[in-house]
Amino acid sequence: MRIIEDALWDGVKARQGAIRKAMNPAGTNSGRPRLEHARRPAHLLAGLMKCACCGSSYTLIDKNRYGCAAPRNKGESICTNRASILREEVETRVLDGLREALLHPDLIAAFAEEYRRAFNETAADANAERDKAKRDLAKAEKKIAGILAAIEDGMYHPSMKEKMAALEMEKSGLARFLETSPEPPALRLPPRLSDLYRGKITPLSES
């Protein structure tokens, strides 16, 4: 016997699934779950930077600077790299590099192609719904014509009235759907699509 609503149950299960996925290293869903992966990093690059000298993690050594953790935690016998960098500076460098890479002409072309693909998929779905409605409308009209022909031939039965009413209602609904769902227009890419893409990428640092 349930004590909570289905929507709440489903929401909790989805959240639990997301946490389990986050707890697995590299998304492999194998091995022992890593609890630290269930926590959201406090900073943009936390846990992503490595020391080029020894491979240890570059971590915040104070409030605003990153440095190699090895010489500070294990001594200089492990690593002598004590170079540090401001958190804001390294984040700016990374984001500027990402922005420059994402503005490569090949990626702008990929954006346009993805736009075209998404548009065509949506149009195909709309056309499929319209085609089905047209077929159903033709079937309903054919059945109505059949009942009328039977009545004209003197084969009237009281049940025909109810059947006719249902068919007329179905026909009306299908006709209304076709009227309010015009065929999708042909694909026309926005004239400044590349500018739209650049506009999405440029404020990356602020986001």
Image: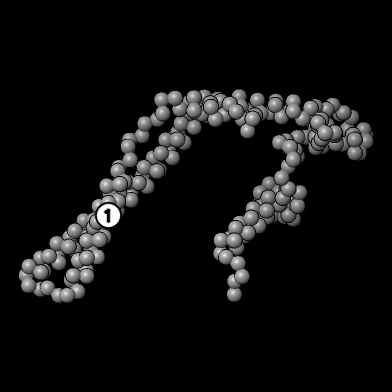
Q: Residue furthest left?
A: 153
* Amino acid type, mark 1: Leu
Residue drawn at x 61%, y 70% is 3
Left/right placement of residue 159 relative to residue 73 reads left
Q: Nearer the viewer, residue 71 or 207?
A: 207
Residue 167: name its quadrant. Answer: bottom left
Q: Is residue 106 visible?
A: no
Percent coordinates x, y for residue 131 in the rendering: 28, 50
Percent coordinates x, y for residue 25 in the rendering: 71, 49
Residue drawn at x 33%, y 49% is 128
Residue 14: name its quadrant. Answer: bottom right
Query: Can you say which quadrant of the picture contains the C terminus?
Result: top right
Percent coordinates x, y for residue 62 in the rendering: 85, 33
The answer to whether 27 is drawn above or below residue 207 in the figure is below
Left/right placement of residue 95 relative to residue 176 reads right
Query: Can you say which quadrant of the picture contains the N terminus?
Result: bottom right
The answer to whether 68 is drawn above or below residue 144 in the figure is above
Badge 1 crowding class, 10 Å Cα cut-off, few under 14, some 14 to 19, many 20 or more, is many
Which residue bears the numbered disc 1?
A: 174
Residue drawn at x 31%, y 46% is 181
